[in-house]
Image: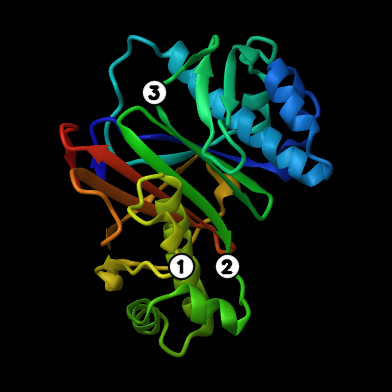
Amino acid sequence: MNESNPPKVALIDMASCEHVLAIAPACLSARETQRWRQYRHQRRQQEWLAGRLAAKALFWQRLEQSGAAAPSGRPHVQQLTPSALAALPMKELHQIEILAPDQGKAPQLFWKGAPVNDGLSVAHAGGLVCVGISSTGEIGLDVETCELRASAYYRSSFAESEHRWVQRLGGNNRNRRIFGYTLLWAFKESLFKTGLLIQPGMIAADTIIIGLPDLIDDHFSDWSQFNIVHLLPIDLRSGSLPQGRHVHAAYCFNGRCVITIIHLCIKSTSTNL
């Protein structure tokens, strides 16, 4: 999955960044601070704050690299380390705002009060917060923890073709089957977060076929040991996608959590899958 201008994706491990998050409210604008204070539970406050900080860090990097040639190649996840976050000019970051137009709607980027026409997606689970920004099309991210769920979840959330795909992937290995279902659901969520589903209310019933299942592996690495984590590309198809878009899908797995990304590029964007 090589792109002429791939989305920027960043990851924060909240457990390792607690001391940075303690000073991170300084990066919020007045409107963001008001929204942040509406959360009653500390964990939800911290997740929301970490997502805003990660998005602002990505956009600030773009501002600093303004005028440089657009990067190309395989998309990856940038690990935002405590030292990198602590070095950010917190008080200047309030000029970058991430605001949701309505409750439950995708957040939007603003720079000095003006909207930025970039795709933005935020996800969190398992103590991880992941953010993606794209200037070439809509983006959807999700983070899911691999764990066994109630049987009703599997019956209601997946089509028969998806059950067969998971069976081919996992066989008699329960952990691989759990991984397969988690991966499928994460891609469903990523697809929903692009905001371009033909029938967004039908996410649970939508059939997503992932090609080349023999190339999808549940090997993993310890993300905390790397500043850059490469995303593994896959072939994804769905009847719910709009026409006229290149679909780029990829994921990474650390043995506990899955991160998925779907990037919907406009046709005029030069890409090589």
Image quarter of residue 34: top right
SS under mark 2: loop
**Mark carried by residue 204:** 1
Residue 252 at x, y percent in the picture: 45, 54
Along the polypeptide, which appears first: circle 3 or circle 2?
Answer: 3
What kind of colouring is applied to the model shown? rainbow
Q: CA distance from mark 3 to mark 2?
A: 34 Å
- For residue 103, side relative to residue 161 (left or right): right
The 10 Å Cα crowd at callout 3, few under 14, some 14 to 19, many 20 or more, is: few
Q: Which mark, by number, is residue 168?
A: none
Q: Of the residues tagged 2 and 1, which is closer to the observer?
A: 1
Mark sitting earlier along the chain (2/1): 2
| Residue 272 or residue 160, whichever sits in front | 160
Residue appearing at x 63%, y 28% in the figure: 53
User: Residue sitting at 74 percent across and 31 percent down?
Assistant: 36
Relative image position of residue 158 (x, y in whole percent) = 43, 75
In the depicted structure, whether residue 156 falls above or below residue 79: below
Seen in the image, is 39 located left or right of residue 114?
right
Q: Which residue is mark 2?
A: 146
Describe residue 40's horizontal placement relative to residue 82 as left or right. right
Three-letter amino acid code of the residue under disc 1: Ala
Separation (CA) of disc 2 from disc 1:
18 Å
Mark 1: secondary structure: loop
State whether residue 201 is above or below residue 23: below
Question: Could one spot residue 246 in this view of the protein?
Answer: yes
Q: Quadrant of residue 14?
A: top right
| Image quadrant assignment for residue 87 | top right
Q: Nearer the viewer, residue 252 or 51?
A: 51
Q: Nearer the viewer, mark 3 or mark 2?
A: 3
Q: Secondary structure at mark 3?
A: loop
Residue pointed to by mark 3? 117
